[in-house]
Image (cartoon, rainbow, N blue to C red):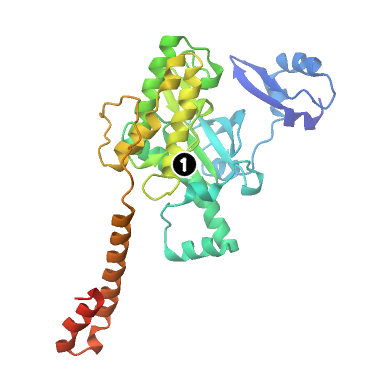
Amino acid sequence: MHRQAADFISIYKYGNRVKLIRMHPQAPDGNRRSNIRKFLHAPEQEIRKYMRIPKSFETLVDNGLIDEVLYQLMSGKEADVYVVQSKGEICCAKVYKEAGKRSFRQQTEYQEGRKGRNSRQARAIEKNSRFGREEKEGAWQNAEAVALQRLAEIGVRVPRIFNCMDGVLLMELVVDANGDAAPRLNDLTLTKAQAVEYHRLMIGQIVLMLCAGLIHGDLSEYNVLAGSDGLVIIDLPQAVDAAGNNNAARMLERDVANITAYFGRFAPELLATDYGKEIWKLYENGKLSPVTKLTGRFEQSGKPADVGGVMRDIDSARRWHELELARAKSSAIPPANQQEAGKQLFHY
């Protein structure tokens, strides 16, 4: 088998054997069936010769955080995931791809509202300098670890994290009832009752995340695992700050719509619900909590917008700002004239 065939192979461990689960139809020798037969019965050590181990693992190996790389679990649009052995335990390592190799688009849209570490980093990122690009990339990679930690603390079902270093996130390997890597939702065929129950659970998790100020931003059946003890949400480097991102409402509604569309394949009545708009409206009004009872219905207000009132508020804010500027310069105005200056601003 030619070494370049490694680009077309994804494998997983089954007992003491290595089994092929996916192969590109245009493999180098042009014979897909032949390649499958070869790899189904190949010794584990032979297949590992063709598996490319990321250089980013070197630091974790040197620091004793990874004992052995066992196999590649999956490849996604922003990272590759490997199953590794760390301090005697089996876990998974997510290796983030370089910015130029990621297929995840509109990264800036997701990062809006995230707090930078200091003003120097923020300026560098804004100027798109070399240092700024490095900082932006580091922030993207660290965002998932921060989000996972934050969500785990409030009870959202996400993988436990163990470490994050040099673009590698070391975390829990979510498994099914047999101890194998858990399947994604899109790999399952559900009954109607299962779909309705899973949908209810996922809506609850979305609400819990929003109560913590976060929105997944890319939630779908491909980013949820069916673990041995329930559904687990994964892939959060693009997690959105609900309060600081102008696209938050749209992203929340899209997350809910994606999940509802998937479960709606098995329980069509779910397609008539509108939890996204209902959840966001409650959040906007400060009425959303993890125990809020949702109806799945949303009625758009027919009351016309008070444009005049909004303009008056804007004008009032502008005048208040002008007054604050005047007060800042008040040291140059004699005390007897300060009250008169304020009257002129507000046209008393």
Front-most of residues 290 and 78: 290
Q: Position of residue 175 (x, y in %)?
A: 48, 20
Identify the residue at horizontal 60%, vertical 29% (top origin): 74
Q: What residue sits 20% from the left and 78% below the top?
A: 343
Q: How many marks?
A: 1
Q: In front: 245, or 48?
A: 245
Q: Residue furthest left?
A: 336
Check disc 1 and report the residue beneath it: 144
On the picture, is 150 further left or further right than 51? left
Position in image of residue 237 (x %, y %): 49, 41
Local crowd size for mark 1, using a 10 Å CA cut-off: few (<14), some (14–19), many (≥20): many
Q: Quadrant of residue 298?
A: top left
In the picture, the quarter occupied by the N terminus is top right
Q: Secondary structure at mark 1?
A: helix
Give how far across and how far down residue 165 sits, in percent. 51, 46
Give the percent coordinates (x, y) of residue 260. 45, 24
- Give the residue type at disc 1: Glu
Give the residue displayed 45% in from the left and 40% down from the top: 250
